[in-house]
Amino acid sequence: MDYDADKIDDAALALLMLTVHDEDEYGARVWKGHDWEVLNRLHEKDLIGDPVSKAKSIVITPEGLAKGRELFTKLFSKNS
């Protein structure tokens, strides 16, 4: 199937908002239970830290957190 990888990345980033924890001025942590190719693209876009580690969570940058929240509202809000 041919698909738009940027749309997939946006949806995955929005879904990461469901697991935000340990938030501070440097970003937050999120569980990394998504496709590795998607996580690598999000890392290349500087929206998350490097997903390659033994940890079950990753750092989401302040920019990734802001964009993720915006996308979550846009994609999943009942009022949109």
Image: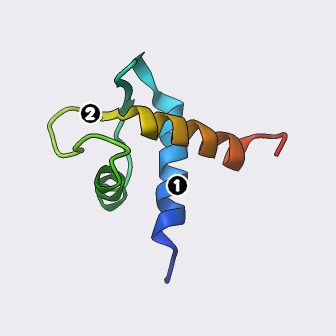
Of the residues shown, which amino acid type is indicated by label 2? Answer: Lys
Q: Residue furthest right?
A: 79
Give the distance between the C-alpha atoms of the residues marked 1 and 2, in whole angstroms. 21 Å
Q: Position of residue 54 (x, y in %)?
A: 15, 36
| Residue at 38% in and 49% down | 34
The residue under label 1 is 10
Tag 1 secondary structure: helix
The coloring applied to the image is: rainbow
| Residue at 53% in and 35% down | 66
Of the residues shown, which amino acid type is indicated by label 1? Answer: Asp
Tag 2 secondary structure: loop
The foreground one among 57 and 6 is 6
Left/right of residue 17 with respect to residue 60 in the rendered view:
right
Q: Residues within 10 Å of mark 2 (few under 14, many from 20)?
A: few
The residue under label 2 is 56
Q: Looking at the image, is 4 positioned above or below residue 67?
A: below
